Image (cartoon, rainbow, N blue to C red):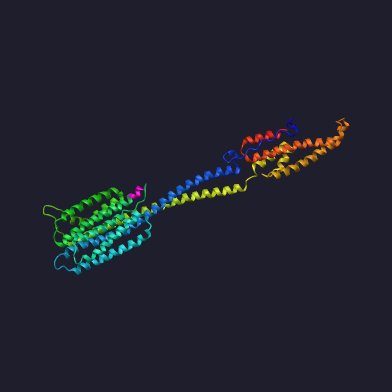
Amino acid sequence: MGAGPDPARGAAPAPRRRRSGFRLRDWRMGTKLATVLVIPSLAFLVLAGIQTRGLVGQTTTLSAFAEQVGIGRQISTVVDRLQHERDRTAGELAVLRRAGADRDAAVAALTPLREATDRAMAELRAAAAPLADADAAWRVSYSEALEAYDQVVSIRAAVAPAVLSSDTVLSNYHRSVAALLNLLAEPSPGGGRQELTEVVLRYVQLSRVKELSSRIRAELYAAARSGRYEADDQVTLSDLRAQQLTALGAFRVAATAEQIRRYDRTSVDPAFAAATRMEERTLPGGAGPALLDATQWWAASEQRQELFRQLESEIVADAVRQADDASARQLRETLLVAGAIATVLLVAVLISLLVGGRWPAPCGSCAARRCGSRRGPAADAATAAYRGPPDRRDRRTALGDRLAGRDRRAGGGVRGGAPQRRRRGGRAGDDATQRQRHVRQPGRRSQVLVERQLELLDDLEREESDPSSWRTFSSSTTSP
């Protein structure tokens, strides 16, 4: 016949539930706190990284844009020198085609102009050296401009002997100027920067107006030096004038009110107006286009081109200033955002270190000590024996020590109370047997109670944030 459970030993402890890493209630408090802190921190770092990367990209783009706009001063200088050389070459070619032409005089007249163009090109090469890592589109345009200029240098040798036609020689100059103007229009501030795009468009349109004026000067100077118009000269001049009016209208649309006023003041300048009046005499009319005096026309048109050059320099300077300001503002914004992010991270790390250095004892130990102080000697014994998560052998050793102390205290109580019970007519029997029975029963109850307290402490260690564990612990400690 099987023996039933011994009431003295109490109910058997509930089986321990295995810890699962997939349930939040089984996570340790440190793991939960780390999760709460790490996930928002990682999200902040990802968003901050994306924002910083975008700002750095914009800063890099605007910095390159400012450099490319700044080099526009050297480009416009090369274009101006090349226009001067081309227009004068057109007149000298017209003379060299006549019999008995003084070729040495033509070469002497062109040599200082060629040297000035070469110096301007050398300055452009030096200014463009830091832009070796510029975007691919700008580098391609720059390479095309250099290649076109090299063709001009090679064609110069064919001017004095006049072995090539004027159209062949001058077309190389036209191609080189066009390549430089394309390079002048290449800077791009990126998307969403329409105001900076218009900054580039303004000086490019004015440069095209100046180029078409220079082309008209070359045609009229060549006709003046040769003493006659060629068959298709009037068609060419009419086309150039129409293109000039179109370019001037585009400039007025893109330019600011102040820049339009500057152009209007330039166009009424006496030197500018004198060249314009001379050019109007060459327009087709009833008596036909007039031939201009070559020397007078060159002097008047040179002054007009110089006025164009001054206006062009001012508008390019405006563009450079605006590009530099935009780049500087973007750099400041990027530094401020990066500094703010770094400050937030630094403060967060310092606070974490400060709070972590003052972290209190584990919640399970504190709870056990509080419960032990309220529940009596057995809970005190379990709390004193609990110093974190010891292994099973340490627990049994601590349990044996506590039970031995319990036996001694219980034994003392029995020895002190036995004579009194005998005097009052207590139960008969051997004193040693009675004392042993009275000692054994409290010891067994204490053993069961301590084991239950140890099991509960293990659960508290795993489930420190579970409110139901506190109710379980409270009900268990109050049970006999």
Is 361 on the left-hand or right-hand side of 120?
Answer: right
Of residues 113 and 100, which is closer to you in this image?
A: 100
Which picture quadrant has residue 158?
Answer: bottom left
Eyeballing the image, is 308 above or below 399? below
Residue name at image x 57 percent, y 40 percent? 22
Is 453 on the left-hand or right-hand side of 203?
Answer: right
Residue name at image x 21 percent, y 51 percent? 242
The main secondary structure of the magenta stretch is helix
Of residues 417 and 327, which is closer to you in this image?
A: 417
Assign the N terminus to one quadrant of the image: top right
Can see residue 288?
yes
Of residues 5 and 100, which is closer to you in this image?
A: 5
Residue 382: horizontal and vertical position, in percent? 71, 40
Eyeballing the image, is 72 above or below 98? above
Looking at the image, which residue sits at the far right?
Answer: 423
Residue 431: horizontal and vertical position, in percent? 86, 36
Give the residues in magenta.
Answer: 193-197
The total number of labels drawn is 0
Residue 405 located within the stretch drawn in magenta: no
Looking at the image, which residue sits at the far front?
Answer: 1
Looking at the image, which residue sits at the far left?
Answer: 287
Eyeballing the image, is 48 above or below 108? above
Eyeballing the image, is 408 above or below 91? above
Residue 138: horizontal and vertical position, in percent? 34, 55
Of residues 435 and 60, which is closer to you in this image?
A: 435
Which picture quadrant has residue 480?
Answer: top right
Is 55 on the left-hand or right-hand side of 383?
Answer: left
Which picture quadrant has residue 413?
Answer: top right
Can see residue 281?
no
Residue 427: horizontal and vertical position, in percent? 85, 31
